[in-house]
Image: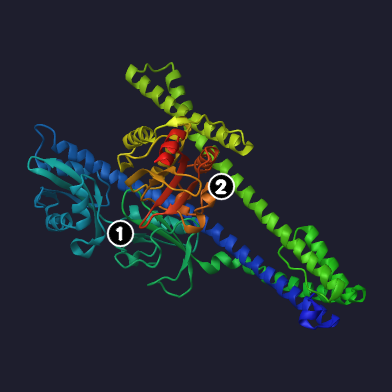
Amino acid sequence: MFPLGRWRLGLRGQLVAQVVIGVVVVVGMLLLLRAYIAQEEMDRGGRARQSVGRVLAGYIDAQLTNQLAQLARAAGQFALPGARPAPSLLEDARSRLEASSHGVYLLDASGMLIAADPLEIGAVAEAVGRRPEVVEAIARGRPAVSGVHTGPRGRPQFAVVVPVRLAAGVGQLGSLVDPTSPLFVELVEAARAMDDGIVAEVVDQFGTVVSATQRERTLLPAAFPVLAPGAAGTGQIARPIGISGDEPFLVVRVPLERAPWHLVVAVPEARILAPVRRWDQPLAGMGIATFLVLVGLSVLTSRGIVGPVQTLIQSARRIARGDLASPVPRVGGGELGNLAAALDDMRGDLRTADQARAEVDHLKDEFISSVSHELRTPLGFVKGYATTLLRTDTRWDSRTARRCLEIIDESSDQLLELVDHLLDMSRINEGKLSVNPEPTALGPLIEEARHRYGSRSREHVMVARISPECPEVHADPSRVRQILNNLLDNAIKYSPEGGDIAIELEVVDTPVAPMAQVSVCDRGIGITSDQLEVVFDRFNRGRNPLIRKIRGVGLGLPICRGIVEAHGGRIWAERATEQGTIVRFTLPLARSAVEVGGGG
């Protein structure tokens, strides 16, 4: 119910308001249900048409592959010693091509015609050889499929071209293909046989129709030019251009593999949604029935409701069921008001605790997922290469066997490192992390880490700036090395574009005593200001989607914090001035260094 003090409604007004809200909610739910059913039907229809498109695209790819294979076989004949004259080879190549070919031709490295079969296609062949998409592909040594264009006698055609090595350089061996031949038209029209009402078009890289279920659309602009280039999956809704009628279509796009073309399969949206519209009347009846039920229940329960007390009882029951989002109404004053305030305070505390628990559960789930992935990758290498070496049907040379063993060794090191991280995190949580501090020079440790990681990543430049006045610190060398390894590993991972990574060592004054400060600065993705503190919490990898795509389990920085704090130091992160992140940590100076500094 609504709080009386705030809304100043009587019992009847509160009941009317409840009925209205209930009707709105139910109607909204029914509309959502109807929308959900419609979307499911659209998704199902899109997937079905996508399957049809993939089958047809596969057949078209097969035809293009056959054309290219025949041309590649013929191109190999030109490179053989004592090869026959070009006209004879072209005549032989044309005899092996499909009936849809207008003819074959051979161009030299400058694009001039050497031979053509028949000769009348020579001028067209030279024009095709100068098309940008053909020139670019041949320059890369790759076969090309041109866009559709008008050929001799106004007939549509496209070219399939392969590079051929000639004495004067790399030339072109091509075939002019007729997309209106029965071979291509029957493939596209097969879509209509699979599903009546389908509109299918093969569209080239320039948005021109190569072949379509409506044959007269060849050489016209595509009927669905607004379709996003990457559209796939369940498709999208679009209105056609150049097709009679203005009804929307469900459109899916299937790219071809052998040509920079795509196959568009479309079906009227009304055809897809016809089964859904049969639900409209039953859903309307359910809405009316629900309204009548709500009115009847309100009338029946009005006699047994006792204003504020019943409101508080309902609020308490909502809290008991786990609804912590709805506030407890402030009803009345005096003791009832205090009780309502106390219930609302309890709800707020429970909600805060529940959100914290949910966040921890979410972080744990992410951690388990990340650890599983980090374990699976090296285990896969170990299993795969071990199985390879154990095969009895193959004898491996020593070099190959050694490489397999090296990969197994590297993967084992990754597993060991991950297990060590988990054990260290467990010891830190239990307060049992052991450190053995001793007078330690940080300079050699920094140089060692710089050389190690510098050799691992050639895209990054490791720079060390070590203050010559920095004395020894009182720290465990192995743990300091672990900190440096974690920080440099993070710096490399989160600066995928490369750049400088600087390691700085200096002595700074703190409120307690002078301490050695080490800073690791990268020019990578960076950390947002609100995440600078939480990245040191266990399992937390921040909320930047770019960071979360990078491998890791979120234990490196928490372990660093545990080690630094075990030495009596402090670790924190800062945003770099321009780009990137700076992580700094401090360690206490060795006693002799402190005494010398104090004596000075």
Would you say 85 lies left or right of 188 here? left
The residue carrying pointer 2 sits among few (fewer than 14), some (14 to 19) or many (20 or more) residues within 10 Å by Cα, namely some
For the residue marked with disc 1, what is the amino acid?
A: Gln
Q: Are marks 1 and 2 in contact (CB under 8 Å)?
A: no
Please tell me whether mark 1 sits on a helix, a strand or a loop. Answer: loop
- Residue nearest the viewer, comparing 340 with 188: 340
Circle 1 sits on which residue? 205
Quarter of the image that includes the C terminus: top left
- Front position among marks 1 and 2: 2
Q: Is residue 146 visible?
A: yes
Whole-percent x, y for residue 149 in the image: 24, 62
Where is 517 relative to 192, above or below?
above
Please tell me whether mark 2 sits on a helix, a strand or a loop. Answer: loop
- Residue nearest the viewer, comparing 530 with 368: 530
Circle 2 sits on which residue? 537
Q: Residue at x 48, y 73 (%)?
A: 247
Whole-percent x, y for residue 344 in the image: 76, 66
Residue 575 numbered tag = none
Whole-percent x, y for residue 260 in the image: 31, 54
Q: Is residue 489 visible?
A: no
Q: Quadrant of residue 472?
A: top left
- Residue nearest the viewer, comparing 133 with 318: 318
Q: Residue at x 74, y 73 (%)?
A: 287
For the residue marked with disc 2, what is the amino acid?
A: Asp
Where is 560 relative to 393, above or below?
below
Q: Residue at x 48, y 60 (%)?
A: 235
